[in-house]
Image: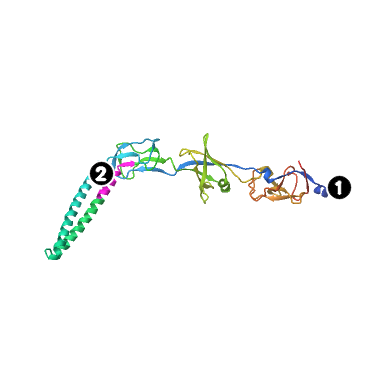
Amino acid sequence: MKSVLAVVALVLAPALAVANETVTVRSFAQVAVYLERQAAASVESLNEITLAAEISARVVEINARPGDPVAVGDVLVRLDEREFRNRRQAAMARLAMAEAAQDMARIRAERARRLAPDRFVSEDQLLEAETNLRLAAAELEAARSDLRQAELMLDRTRITAPFAGVVTRRAVGEGALAAPGTPLLELVATSGLEVSASIPPEQVAGLLSADRVHFDSGTRNWPVQVDRIAPVISRGSRGRQARLVFVGQSAAPGSEGRIRWTDPRPALPGDFVVQRDGVLGVLLLADDGNTVSFQALPGADAGRPYLASDLDPAARLINEGRRRVQPGQRVTVSER
């Protein structure tokens, strides 16, 4: 009896293999989804500096506290200027003396030039007068340089804001003795802000072609646009650093949040990704209209949407019945 059943099964097997399965078909364009993407991001200021002393002097006044907004040129810290004011006065006096010495040397040189043709002065005396004039000119230039240096040192007793920003830290107090390099205040610019985010390499193209990108922080969001993306992959994050700029108003420096965008490239829904013979791919209706074909999807993950850039939008996907059919199987397409 068992042998008879086996023979019957062998006879019926070819008929079962060629039996048509009823399926429905939809185009890739009809089922395509557009993936919502996001990445952790933070707002960074391009100008974030520590203002330091350039001279040795005592701090006499600090005009800004942490959290205070400041404008370009605002005097934030004043150092004791008395010594440097005295140096400037001395330099001005040396300059006046050098100017008087040059005037005297010029008069003597001009008189020597007039008298030389009539032999009233010797060649040595003329040479000495010309030399003294050049020396006086050099002394005058040195005195002018000393005055410029004295004025520069005096200017350094006033530490001003190089850009508009916010004071974030006060490093010294009034009465402290500052030396060159002593930190005084930390300042962060409130303009020229950028959003920094690490983007997986496979998502960069979608970010660059997205119609809209937003930076979300808390309950607020701000429109941003891509300014540049690093051409290298970070060792730590394994992503490419993206720099985005605000369109209009900006979030505060240091804000943490996420950037969000919709990838405009069509993706295949995850439930259309099937496995056949250990390979993940998608089942299609062949050009003859009644045979199943299989297209492998390199890098696909089961159950996850797949960016099928090489899949024709008009490609006919097996919809209902795709779990049952096999590549090469003949099917009947239902109009449902």
Residue where numbered disc 1 is placed: 8
Residue 273 appears in the figure: no
Residue type, mark 2 in image: Phe
* Magenta segment, prevailing SS (helix, strand or loop): helix
**Quarter of the rendering occupied by the N terminus:** top right
| Nearer the camera: disc 1 or disc 2 | 2
Q: Amino acid at mark 1?
A: Val
**Residue 60 point in image, percent of width and height:** 29, 37
Question: For this view, does 148 lie left or right of residue 129?
Answer: right
Mark 2 highlights which residue?
84
List x then y, in percent, for residue 290.
77, 49
Residue drawn where x is 28% and y is 42% of the image: 57
Q: Which residues are magenta?
A: 146-159
Is 149 one of the magenta-colored residues?
yes
**Residue at figure coordinates x 52%, y 44% from the top left:** 225
Query: Would residue 299 be counted in the magenta stretch?
Result: no
Percent coordinates x, y for residue 157 in the rendering: 30, 42
**As drawn, is 90 to the left or to the right of 256?**
left
Q: State the quadrant of the C terminus.
A: top right
**Mark earlier in primary sequence (1, 2):** 1
Identity of the residue furthest to the left in this view: 120
Q: Secondary structure at mark 1?
A: helix
Left or right for 128, reference 147: left
Tell me, for residue 269, which label it has, or none: none
Q: Residues within 10 Å of mark 1 (few under 14, many from 20)?
A: few
- Nearer to the camera, 2 or 57: 57
Q: Residue at x 20, y 49 (%)?
A: 96
